Image (cartoon, rainbow, N blue to C red):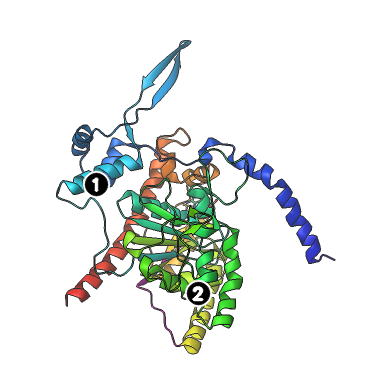
Amino acid sequence: MVNFKDLESFSIRVESLQEEILASEYKNPEAVKQSPLFTISDAAKYVGVSRKLFNDLIADESIERVTPIKTLEKEGVTIEKTMPAKFTLDQIEKIRQHLKANGQKGNYTNRRPKHTKKPYTLMIGNLKGGANKTTVSIHLAQWLALNGYRVLGIDSDPQGSFTSLMGFLPYEYKGLPDGAYYVDEINTLYPLYSDNEPLRPVKTYWQNLDIIPANIDVYSAEFSLPARQIRDGESFFDILAKALVTKEQDWPTEFDTHYNGEYLGDVYNPDDYDIIIIDTPPSYSYATLNAIQAADAMVIPVPAQHLDILATGIFFKQMVSVFSDLEQIFGFSKEFDFVVGLKTKMSENFEALQNGGRISAIFRESLINTPFLISKSITVASDFNKTAYELQNTDIIGRSTLKKSLDNLEQIHLEIENKIKQFWQIQTKLEIK
Ligand SMILES: Nc1ncnc2c1ncn2[C@@H]1O[C@H](COP(=O)(O)OP(=O)(O)O)[C@@H](O)[C@H]1O
Ligand SMILES: [Mg+2]
């Protein structure tokens, strides 16, 4: 017989090993994230100018270049070789701002249309764990930010994988390397869900990408949300949706700006962002319900494996059942601008191709045309707690393997961006009428 006391002993044993586990994971200085370095061609591409103009601008702006030095051994002699200049995300943003300030023609910063009330909110969801939700969310969020959108990534999964990849450690522990960040509960979704406290996004090492991080505290929302419903008669499924349209000055309740004399950080303001990406847990939780209600659109990654396709069917079934209940009980209805499937774990093998065909048959035209290919770049990157973008200009993976993977991601991201832009255009037309 096993009772809860026995389970507690497992948990205590995990805790006693926690220091050791975290120490081995974070001993590496890479735990403190820094901007990756971009070549001049990539930097120019993301800003949307020619390499030549980019080069001229750096000369003008005297933006410091990073010139990596490579040490080579040749016939027993050590040679230091200066490599071509590289740029950080921060420098890329400076160039962008410079172009904008100087009235250069072109869209160097991507902004949502003025009349839109809130950032375009895209949820990445599927009940299935390992469907590549987090991988899709983080690469999309980083790519949009690279292209000049102001992005907010919301991690609503208590497991916090998106959060870790963004350089925030899920636990505080004494061996943290200098400069490492850990998740503070105040920045998670928990204060919103439990007490209607405002969201407090944190800045990250990735320029233009802020996050609402997650850790296990977020899981407590699963208890506080229904409790609020019972206690205050407040609806428990649209709290995030309401928060995302609330400006700083419009919070219904007084909230603390300081705790123990320390500033708690800036409060979320919809005007600060163009696009929000919500990564969701692999469960039908209250947090997932809130994400669905807050989302303008949803991308559903579906692995090209038969069990995952079946699990996606259950996801739809549950969603339909929960939302028709909500409609009956609360009289509310939910509409998405679009819901699209995305084939993941695609390869050339027979089974993947066959299952890919099935996914196409299910989603028909509501499908991202480019499948997300299985790639060594992504597996290796995640072993290093990195995204594929962070492998650029490192020796970790071969250039052609990485390029193939980055090109694949770019095709997927462009398709998603185009869908969002279509809806912005539709709204603009309605506004003009
Ligand atoms: N395109 C890919 N190629 C190879 N491995 C991938 C790819 N996408 C994701 N993975 C790996 O699959 C695992 C599960 O992906 P993840 O995004 O965490 O799934 P989810 O968030 O749906 O649970 C991770 O270890 C991730 O690194
Ligand atoms: Mg995940």
Q: Viewer-proximal residue, 250 or 410?
A: 250
> Which residue of the protein is positioned furthest toward the front in this rendering?
261
Residue furthest to the right: 1
> Which quadrant holds the N terminus?
bottom right
Q: Which residue is mark 1?
A: 97
Locate the C terminus and report the quarter of the image it occupies: bottom left
* Residue 78 in view of the camera: yes
* Rendering coords of residue 257 (x, y %): 45, 60
Q: Nearer the viewer, residue 252 or 339?
A: 252
Give the residue at x 39% y 24%.
69
Query: Which x, y percent locates residue 263?
Result: 46, 54
SS of the residue under disc 1: helix
Residue 372 appears anywhere in the view: no
- Picture residue at 71% right of the left edge, 51% below the top: 15
Say above or below: 64 vs 416.
above
Count residues near mark 2 (Cα–Cα under 10 Å), then give few for <14, some for 14-19, many for 20+: few
Q: Which mark is residue 316?
A: 2
Which residue is rendered at x = 68% and y = 42% of the image? 20
Q: Amino acid at mark 2?
A: Phe
Residue 276 at x, y = what percent? 39, 62
Above or below: residue 348 compared with residue 308: above
The residue sitting at 31% across, 30% down in the picture is 85
Badge 1: few (under 14), some or many (20 or more) residues near its Cα, within 10 Å? some
Q: How many marks?
A: 2
Q: CA distance from mark 1 to mark 2?
A: 43 Å
Amino acid on which the number 1 mark rests in the picture: Gln
The picture places residue 223, in percent across and down from the top left corner, at 61, 72
Would you identify the image quadrant in which residue 311 lies?
bottom right
Q: Which residues are magenta?
A: 331-341
